[in-house]
Amino acid sequence: MGSPLVLVDVDGVLNPFERPTRGFRRHRCSPNGITFRLWLNSGHGPMLRELAEETGAELAWASYWCDNANEWIAPRVGLPQLPFVPIPRFPGYEEGGTLGSWKARHVASWVAGRPFVWFEDEPDATDCIAAEEGVGDHLLVSTDPMVGLTEQDVERAAGWLRSLDR
């Protein structure tokens, strides 16, 4: 089955939508020639790496940033290059359903039954991932997109990962 996964979204999780608390710095990122202004916290990387190391989990991106997260986000928050869920551009509500359902179907396919924690801010992602066929044990930690990832979110994930029967 493999070790559990810790899946990390970028926007709304590592990059909160409101001006964040101390510890965040403003960054300009230009994947594919499009410039974004992000708030990123260099403390998030060490916190996520410690979570993975202490629980035997593997970190991966689950974001529309896909591999761009390795170039533009990882070095700014203190993460190494990570594997990523290949989530194609959202095709719109007619074809893709909601943003949460679109991401959930790609996450479900990529994790292939492995247990996982997913830090995500899409409001319907919890119901959507639970409805996907073949999804094994998982915990969706719903982050507040105005605040982003917190220590409490990481502690919740750590408790769940430690409780897995391996």
Image (tube, grey):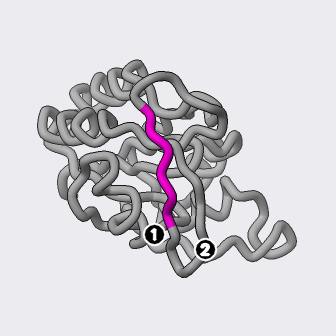
**Position of residue 164 in the picture relative to residue 116 (left or right):** left
Secondary structure category for the residue under label 1: loop
Residue 135, image x, y percentages: 46, 55
For the residue pair 116 and 69, the one nearer the viewer reads as 69
Residue, far right: 94
Report the predominant secondary structure element of the magenta stretch. Answer: strand
The N terminus sits in image quarter? bottom left
Residue under pointer 1: 66
Looking at the picture, does residue 71 appear above or below residue 162? below
User: Outermost residue, bottom direction?
Assistant: 32
Residue 78 in percent (x, y) is at: 25, 47
Amino acid type at image mark 2: Ile
Quadrant (top left, top right, bottom left, bottom right) of the C terminus: top left
- Assign a secondary structure to mark 2: loop
Q: Which residues are magenta?
A: 24-29
Q: Residues within 10 Å of mark 2 (few under 14, many from 20)?
A: few
The residue lying toward the viewer, choosing from 24 and 166, is 24
The answer to whether residue 90 is above or below residue 49 is below
Give how far apart the Cα atoms at labels 2 and 1 are: 15 Å
Residue type at mark 1: give it. Answer: Cys
Question: Of 116 and 143, which appears nearest the observer?
Answer: 143
Residue designated by label 2: 34
Residue 48 located within the stretch drawn in magenta: no
Q: Are marks 2 and 1 in contact (CB under 8 Å)?
A: no
Q: Residue at x 69, y 40 (%)?
A: 123
* 32 or 59, nearer to the observer: 32
Residue 91 coordinates in the image, percent (x, y): 75, 76
Q: Point out the frontmost of discs 2 and 1.
A: 2
Q: What residue is at 44 percent from the left and 34 percent from the top?
A: 24
Q: Of label 2 and label 1, which has the lower sequence position?
A: 2
Residue 164 spot, x, y in % from top left = 25, 33
